[in-house]
Amino acid sequence: MAESNLDVVLVDLGTRLAVPPPPEDLQSRVMARLASTPARSRLRRWFGWALTRLRRLWRWVVAGLLVLVVSLGAVPPVRAQVSSWLSFLGVVVRAPAPGSPVPTVQPSPPPASAGLTLSQAAALVRFRPVVPAELGLPAAVEVSGDRRLLSLSWQTSTGTVRLDQFDGRLSPRFVKTSRDAEYVEVGDTTGLWFPTAHEVVVIDRPGTQESRELPPRLAAQTLVWEESGTTVRLEGRLTRDRAVQIARSAG
């Protein structure tokens, strides 16, 4: 296995690990226990169990956030630089190799293939398309062959603006190589901002035996965030404030 693909494989494996089934007699044991317990007592026990689980979950969340903040610097804007890689909403971020050149060009994202209407694309994917009000209706709409990636594009005064969206809970879809990604606030959620040109690789049919990396390309400034359970990736020659403004108009 190529070392460059190891991070993607590990993240993808984590989304598909098999969980052992519960004991065969678990249901009968639970039902027998419920039948022997008064309804009010059962309700109290259920609430007690739920609160205990929530407290434990909250402790894990807080502990995880503390580790993350400490490891990423804890200085606003929090840097997302790591020694090897970081997975964020289905986007894998890799640190560049030591001594690799810094991109100096200002790339423009490729427009989506004009072949579908927005309503046609919405019927093909399993999520509601995100269309920022700041950009209006897209000039081009495209859906990937596996129907898991929806791409929109607009032609603006600064060039092409591209919006990719997919279900980031399934498998990694994009691999980015960046030195200076940072966390930003996008409404009530947290996004990841890439302020400079960086290499991006699209993973075709992730989570399947046909999964493969498409040829890398140089991406422009990019904002990644989550909108109603969908991972959204906005790319174009944009400032961070303008990108956040566009993202907020999608809610």
Image (cartoon, helix red, strand yellow):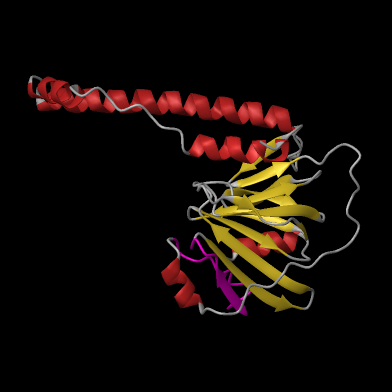
Where is residue 149? Give x, y as percent. 54, 61
Seen from the viewer's position, the closer of residues 193 and 92 is 92
Give the left or right position of residue 18, taking residue 153 as reference: left
Dividing the picture into quarters, in which one does residue 98 lie? top right
Seen from the viewer's position, the closer of residues 127 and 131 is 127
Residue 134 lies in magenta, yes or no?
Answer: yes
Residue at 15% in and 22% down:
41
Quadrant of the frame with the N terminus:
top right
In this picture, which residue range is highlighted in magenta? 127-147
Give the left or right position of residue 43, taking residue 108 as reference: left
Image position of 187 with respect to 31: above or below? below
Where is residue 105? Give x, y as percent. 89, 61
Image position of 136 with respect to 98: above or below? below
Image position of 64 with respect to 159: above or below? above
Where is residue 54? Give x, y as percent. 40, 28
Seen from the viewer's position, the closer of residues 36 and 207 is 207
Where is residue 37? Give x, y as percent. 10, 20
